[in-house]
Amino acid sequence: MSNDTFSSKKKIIKILGSCNCIVIVPDGFSYKGTTNLLTHFASSFIKTIEAYGVINCKYKNAIIDLNHTDEIKKNKRISKEFLNPLYKFKEEIRGNNQTPLSLIFKMSDPHPETAQKSDIIIGTGQGERGNPERPHRSTFPPSLLTKLRVSLSDSDFKTELAPVDSLLCGREKHCLNQLFFQKNFIKNNYDPDTQSLLFTFDEGSLGKTIEEAVAKGKKVAKGLSHLIHKMPLVRQVQLKSIEAASHEDKKYIFRVNNDGDAIHSLIREGYIEELAESIKQSGLLHPLVLLQKENGNYKILCGFRRYQALTRLGKEWVEAKIYKEDNFSREEFFNISLAENTRRRNLNPVEIGNFLESAAQELELNNAHLAEKFGQSLGIGKPNTKVSQSTIHKYRKVNAIRTRKESPEIISDIINERLQFTIAAEILAPIKDPKDRNRLHIDIIKPLQPTRPQIIQIKKLLEKFGAPLAVTLTQMEVIKGIEKALNSRHRAAHFIKTLQNLKLPAEKKIKKTPLQKRTSELKAILISKNLKESDLKLTPTNAKNKNELTLQLKIRPDNLQEAIQTLINIGAHEQQLSEIFNK
């Protein structure tokens, strides 16, 4: 997390870590527009050792003192915002067999008469509840405390221990230093083995600029790194810390969940139930792969269906491999997700389209780049051949049908291998009107099961009716033709024959205007033997302008000489051109 985050956002910042340390900054508010150097020092410290962190940049000390737990507890919303993440982080550390270390950072009172002599005063007191004879029972071992002070001294920080009777010792019941040592404060969060220290910094100890504060944060973090215990890459995570609701949370999830389709939803439900039963019997064979979010939670890189199954089982903890966004580039994360997702089974065509569309949007790639970077790893196209841009376009085109929720049955049939992807991509997807697309699939392709050439032939015959496909397929003679074909041995062939024998509506002859007629005559003169009819177009530019023609000439290697000769010949037909405009 960048240091700019703390100066630009008025919120309580939650930061996920990968070690046993939790850094707490109760007052990181920037007063009167000034820079709070403690927040920048803390963020630099947190980032360097990869600690957990909760930093209050939202509430002024005059509104609520977040050093005072009794005040926090009175306000449920603030308690939820500030304390709940601390307990969650502590539990995650404890869940990975680590002893949590809580470091509370605060600034000293700036008044001259109370100014401290050292850069940092270290408060170690928790006290033993109900025993006035032992008012100062530190949870931090004396030997480690000595090493800590030596390390801080090496980092050019002068330290001293807070007197037992001082407020800076942190032994009062309401102090944050006591957060995990109060049995009745918040249920189930009493943890007397947690280590906790209160650091009170002198006003000038962090420097005068952000750059100085950041540099000191890094220096102190490196000096204390030998006291910090790193957690492994694969570790235990609370399931409730995983978020999978927003589009941003799902940007690396390519398994399709077509919730609008009852058929596919039923199939998916069965798969999740089967997976849940497998996990119940054999445990989780492959850990989830998660990314740390800026809000103190995780999002899924790989394992969305395992996550759904675990949630259904009511699991509290899950084993997961944890990455941060800055561990890899976005392209590398797409490759990691692709490798993880295809390790157990390949993506279906719709999921491939989903992957390609997500990669295109996130990485700003066109079809050519998508083909180059992901074509081979996705296993699409012909073996040992370069994946074409058109192939990528087809997958994205079909996925667009899914995202627009236009043809759920087509998408479901592709996913469940009841419809060939090539037919969907090359015949159905180009049909612009969803009604026409759906009716062709539901009324013709599914019941008659025609081959690809037969589908193309049927589509052309239906289009001769001169109406949209959805309308044509409601005509009584067409419906009867389908019904008869269903009772035939060769359904599609029988229906094609029926369409060929149907009397189609009379075609309307389009009358050419005099201008169009004269340009057609000139075009006939210009066309040479080796120049095709479609190679030359000579048309009025628009209906209003009667004195302008547009010439379109296709030039290819096989017609180069003829095309050049045609351009030369135009000059020899000045009289015909003049007649076109003058008549």
Image: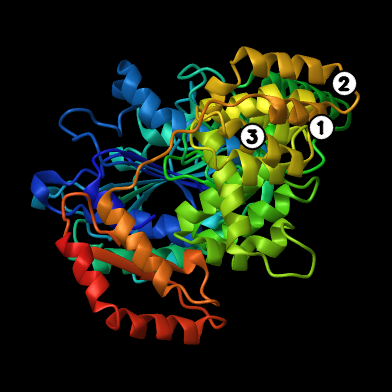
Left or right of 555 in this view: 579:
left
On residue 415, which mark appears?
Answer: none
Query: Residue 241, how many percent across, how many down?
Result: 55, 33
Name the element at disc 3: helix
Circle nearer the N terminus (3, 1):
3
> Residue at the spot x=65%, y=57% of the render?
336
Query: Residue 572, how many percent across, how many down?
Result: 30, 83
Circle nearer the N terminus (1, 2):
2
Query: Which residue carries the number 2 mark?
Result: 488
Q: Please, what is the three-letter code of the amino acid marked with disc 1?
A: Ala
Dividing the picture into quadrants, the one containing residue 452 is top right
Query: Which residue carries the number 1 mark?
Result: 493
Estimate how packed mark 1 is, as few (under 14), some (14 to 19) or many (20 or more) residues with alpha carbons within 10 Å.
Answer: some
Dividing the picture into quadrants, the one containing residue 123 is top left
Name the element at disc 1: helix
Estimate how packed mark 3 is, as few (under 14), some (14 to 19) or many (20 or more) residues with alpha carbons within 10 Å.
Answer: some
Name the element at disc 2: loop
- Tell me if label 1 and label 2 are in contact, CB under 8 Å: yes
Query: Which residue carries the number 3 mark?
Result: 461
Left or right of 245 in this view: 169:
left
View extreme (right): residue: 489
Dividing the picture into quadrants, the one containing residue 501 is top right
Q: Please, what is the three-letter code of the amino acid marked with disc 3?
A: Leu
Instruction: Work out whether residue 262 or residue 316 is closer to the camera in this orientation and state it.
Output: 262
